[in-house]
Image: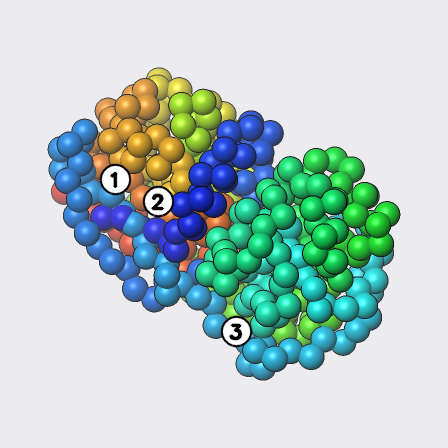
């Protein structure tokens, strides 16, 4: 059974994979779409026998825009103090460039997508954002490539780089607003409000943030009968194979969905290399992985060649679930639906535990 949201174009996914091979990029990716239905298909997996891989179909995953968000009327200039303590004056939102995929998703959800002129490579949702011109990857930007689009406002998170590029853009006269990218259930509403404030539509931001917070609360599993163990892996081929830690969005999402995150069991905050011994000791019931990462190791069969994984309960049952990278790692407005879909997977893992007792 597979869980996956809308897939980015093949070219974009290949570019993203090549960028994410650089280890320094990993911390931000733990740097974040309502699914209305889940397509469930049992797939044969020769490596693990009766493997069942979960894929969430997210093409219909969409946060409803707040009432009136289709034609917002920004109140400008917007004068904001961003995450770095810098005061930024935004006089126009006619040419917006989000330097982060989830930030782009927020702009579209607020109804200003038609004014986005370019995005970075991590923007894969909604499809309109995926189709826009690209200014590079958010960790490998150049002021020159961005300047060619004459943006009236740029929206970024702290991971935008390399160091100095934000200063260069500001020296060229472009307003750059750094918005929060905090993990945890407070993160998505906080990010939404910051983006909306910078765009001069704080009331719409409050509406959407409140809706997303309510979605998170509704989806959160508060008293599960048991908590299946879930390991969240960040993979980019053979060269980058990591267990994501407590600082990643996946940690709190796993806990909210009624699982036990291996980041807590292993006591890791950022990310660490996969250890065969460690995997066998923690014995995860479910493996959670971004879609591009699963592809990079050759799919479910390739995943099971990672040391020790095939010997865990997850490996023996083929309990692998993958979601589109932006949906899983971005901590964005669709996270409530993500929790719901993961909770379904954990329900099945719980049933397997009960049968095996």
Residue 216 in picture, x, y percent from top left: 47, 61
Q: Mark 2 points at which residue?
A: 322
- State yes or no: discs 2 and 1 in contact (Cβ < 8 Å): no
Circle number at residue 65: 3
Circle number at residue 319: 1
Q: Is mark 2 on a helix, strand or loop?
A: strand
Toward the top, the furthest residue is 277
Quarter of the C terminus within the rendering: top left
Residue toward you, 328 or 301 = 301
Circle number at residue 178: none
Query: Which mark sits nearer the N-terminus, 3 or 2?
Result: 3
Q: Is mark 3 on a helix, strand or loop?
A: loop
Q: For the point 50% across and 58% down, which residue is it?
A: 131
Closest to the camera, between mark 1 and mark 3, is: 3
- Separation (CA) of disc 2 from disc 1: 10 Å
- State yes or no: discs 1 and 3 in contact (Cβ < 8 Å): no
């Amino acid at each position: 059974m597979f869980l996956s949201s809308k897939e980015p174009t093949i070219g974009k996914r290949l570019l993203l994979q090549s960028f994410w091979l650089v280890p320094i990029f990993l911390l931000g990716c733990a740097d974040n779409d309502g699914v209305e239905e889940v397509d469930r298909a049992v797939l044969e997996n020769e490596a693990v026998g009766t493997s069942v891989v979960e894929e969430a179909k997210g093409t219909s995953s969409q946060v409803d825009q707040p009432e009136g968000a289709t034609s917002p009327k920004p109140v400008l200039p917007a004068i904001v103090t961003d995450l770095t303590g810098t005061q930024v004056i935004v006089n126009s939102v006619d040419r917006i460039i989000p330097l982060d995929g989830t930030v782009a998703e927020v702009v579209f959800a607020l109804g200003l997508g038609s004014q986005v002129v370019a995005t970075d490579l991590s923007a894969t949702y909604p499809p309109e954002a995926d189709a826009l011109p690209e200014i590079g990857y958010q960790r490998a930007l150049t002021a020159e490539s961005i300047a060619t689009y004459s943006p009236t406002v740029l929206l970024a998170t702290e991971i935008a780089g390399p160091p100095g590029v934000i200063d260069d853009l500001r020296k060229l006269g472009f307003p750059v607003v750094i918005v929060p990218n905090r993990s945890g259930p407070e993160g998505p509403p906080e990010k939404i409000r910051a983006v909306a404030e910078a765009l001069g539509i704080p009331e719409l931001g409050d509406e959407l943030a409140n809706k997303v917070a309510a979605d998170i609360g509704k989806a959160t599993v508060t008293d599960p009968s048991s908590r299946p163990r879930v390991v969240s892996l960040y993979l980019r081929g053979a060269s980058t194979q990591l267990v994501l830690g407590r600082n990643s969005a996946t940690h709190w999402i796993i806990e909210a969905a009624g699982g036990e995150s291996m980041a807590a069991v292993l006591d890791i905050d950022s990310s660490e290399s996969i250890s065969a011994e460690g995997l066998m000791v923690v014995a995860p019931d479910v493996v959670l992985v971004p879609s591009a990462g699963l592809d990079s190791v050759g799919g479910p069969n390739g995943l099971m060649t990672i040391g020790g994984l095939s010997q865990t309960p997850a490996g023996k049952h083929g309990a692998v679930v993958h979601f589109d990278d932006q949906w899983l790692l971005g901590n964005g407005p669709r996270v409530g639906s993500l929790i719901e879909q993961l909770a379904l997977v954990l329900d099945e893992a719980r049933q397997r535990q009960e049968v095996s007792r």
